[in-house]
Image: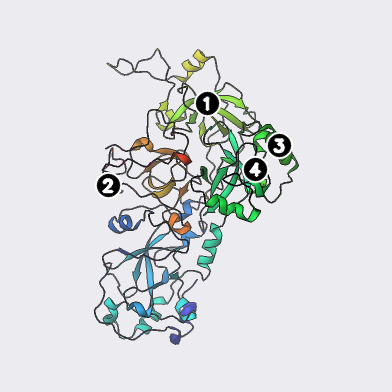
Amino acid sequence: MDAKKFINKGRKSISLHSQLIQRPLALSPTATFSFIMMNKTPSDSYTWDKLLAQNENVYGAPVSCFRHLPLSDGWEQITEGLKLEIINIDCDASLQGYWIASIIKVTGYFALLRYEGYQDDNSNDFWINLANPDVHEVGWSSTNQCQLIPPKNIQHKFEDWKNFLVETLVGAKTLPSNFHDKLMRCLESRFRPGMRLEALDKNDISAMRPCIINKVVGQRLHLIYLEPGKELSNTESIASNGASKPPNSLHASLNDHAEVEGFWCHQSSPLIHPVGWSALVGHKVTADKDYIEKSKELAIQGRYSSDYAPYDLFTRPTRTLPPNSKFEMGMKLEALDPVNLSSICVATIRKVLERGYVMISIDGAPENVQNVFCYHSTSPYIFPLGFCKTHGIELTQPRDYTSSHNVIPNATSAKRFDWDEYLDATKSHSIPDIGDYKEDNLSSQHPTLAVGMKLEAVDLMEPHLMCVATVTREAGRLLKIHFDGWDRAYDQWVDRSSSDLFAPGWCELAGYRLEPSPTASITPESPHRESFEIEGKKRIKRNSNSIPNHKRSNKLRKSKQ
């Protein structure tokens, strides 16, 4: 929106409060304002305030990098110099005045603002989440009969503030009047509480399990597993304690039982599918025979009632393999280990399902580790032989692998993995050439995530946790994500278009809890510390929402002390 439309209303539309206040309030350098967000964020949620205010070099990922986030398509228009109206805390609180501010810098959903009149003085710049309901377009105060009051610290600088504003706003741009409405609409999910679907069984990652949506927060779904024998029960009979409940009390009943185990994921997650998907593709499902038969019939007919999430709500694979690229049981490949997301391993196709899905296992994994997982054949997490070598990534070889090669001088047990030798020894073949997966959901006109950027990321081993993170490495479409304040052993490889990555400020926007970081200082210059002081505390494990015991080979989720 062009701010001159506001100016053209005439100077009378600029309602200025002329009262001069004594005892001016001095703000701290690069202060942060605590406002009440439209979606209430948990009080113990981590805030970006100190990190943004104290570190000028923080490189927050732009919202435009994340196509699944609100207003990502147009966020590049939120640029330096954009004018806003923002509540003025440097005035008498009883006046509830506003003032014009300019954007100095944008990082994620946050903007560094400077009140007009400070000119080149940055001593009172402040950060704010642009989703805050106290951020408005220029002209909002006039429309809503609110006063524009210059900050007390600079009231003496100009005698005619009306004329100053008119001159300042000539040719300036501001937010559209429906900015917040669009932002909130973009947060709405296509799913709703009470819908049924199938999701990964966190207690057996080789299986799916019937679920019901308990709640939706900013397009993230909290799912509750349905007990065997109750998967197709009428809505009124499903409750956390098994008792009969009227339909309108189901959601409240589930919410009231925080101890009920559940599973978090984004609505675009590849880990969720419509009811009957498992039976259609031949995937194992943790359910009784009656469910398997009836759910398949429902899926074939496509006649879902309103209690079932229909097919068109789910994100489907869009990429196609090159012609004649057929996957077969026993073929070898390189794949991301689903229970150790910092590791890409030698893997084998154990079963070929319908519709392009395959079951994959990690070669040489310990027997007590869950080791079979479903990937689509076009998944960005499976790779042709040599992917790791091409990108300089250490390929995790089978534990029992032995080689005739020893390429490290003076090493007693050094082993170099050789794919040709391994294929001969196992009498197996590699997967066909699946091409270089360069397709991206991001337009070439959009920025992409890069090394050094900070963001909010889901800890995929405990997917209810959202943490401050840094991109530390790129490998094709893959990004290495480091959780700030935690050991590198917990890093995870994630596709750059993953719906588990978010711009700084998303949690505050959606009202989702952002995990507090360790007490150690988080700086852009040192994302790879080996250990951090955490006041003797270990990272809290919430196994009720994580893959059982994390199953990370010899890696417990705890900090070095």
Cα–Cα span, label 4 and label 1: 24 Å
For the residues bearing labels 2 and 4, Cβ distance under 8 angstroms: no
Residues shaded magenta: 531-540
Cα–Cα span, label 3 and label 2: 52 Å
Cα–Cα span, label 2 and label 1: 38 Å
Q: Disc 2 marks which amino acid?
A: Ala
* Residue position marked by numbered label 2 in the rendering: 520
Q: Disc 3 marks which amino acid?
A: Lys
x, y (%) of residue 534?
28, 44
For the residues bearing labels 2 and 1, Cβ distance under 8 angstroms: no
Cα–Cα span, label 2 and label 4: 43 Å
Residue at image coords 28%, 67%? 122
Q: In this view, does 294 lie to the left or right of 34?
A: right
* Residue position marked by numbered label 3 in the rendering: 296
* Residue position marked by numbered label 4 in the rendering: 274
Residue at image coords 64%, 40%? 230
Placement of 262 over or under 506, stated as above or below: above
What kind of secondary structure does the magenta stretch mostly adopt?
A: loop
